[in-house]
Image (cartoon, rainbow, N blue to C red):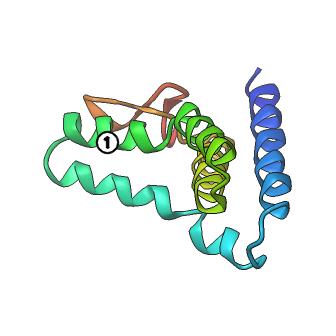
Amino acid sequence: MHKLLRLEEVGQFILAILLFSSLPYSWWVFPLFILLPDISMAGYIHNTQTGSRIYNFFHHKGLGVLIYGIGIWMGQPVLLLAGIIIFGHAAMDRIFGYGLKFPDDFKNTHLGRIGN
């Protein structure tokens, strides 16, 4: 089952790359921004509960889809880019086993414990 889920995430990451290729940005923008959502880990400086809320907000694929949809509606490539980056980053994280965080511990995710 884990392999099937990872394959699904690979497909979603490829989708993000394909959607990015339709935008008017140079190719280097995607790798430059793909790790940007990880800035949300700064919430863990306060505590694990705050950290998990902020982290999960910026790693939720639904947020990426919403921002992308608003970008389509408004005709704003920068919003399309932001939505693709959030969506693609979340898929990439899940490929490597990093899921949404529970508030008790950074390593406790919806995909299981990181490192097990």
Q: Residue furthest left?
A: 46
Percent position of residue 16, x then y: 76, 50
Above or below — where is 61 with respect to 83?
above
The disc labelled 1 sits on which kind of residue? Answer: Ile
Residue name at image x 75 percent, y 28 percent = 5
Residue name at image x 27 percent, y 57 percent = 42
Q: How many marks?
A: 1
Secondary-structure class at tag 1: helix
Q: Residue furthest top?
A: 1
Residue 101 in the figure: left or right of residue 71: left
Residue name at image x 86 percent, y 54 percent = 18
> Closest to the observer: 63 or 10?
63
Percent position of residue 31, x then y: 67, 71
Bin the neighbour count of mark 1 within 10 Å (Cα to Cα): few under 14, some 14-19, many 20 and up: some
Percent position of residue 115, x then y: 50, 43
Which picture quadrant has residue 67? Answer: top right
Residue named by callout 1: 54
Residue 54 in the figure: left or right of residue 37: left
Q: Quadrant of the N terminus?
A: top right
> Closest to the observer: 59 or 19?
19
Residue name at image x 49 percent, y 42 percent = 59
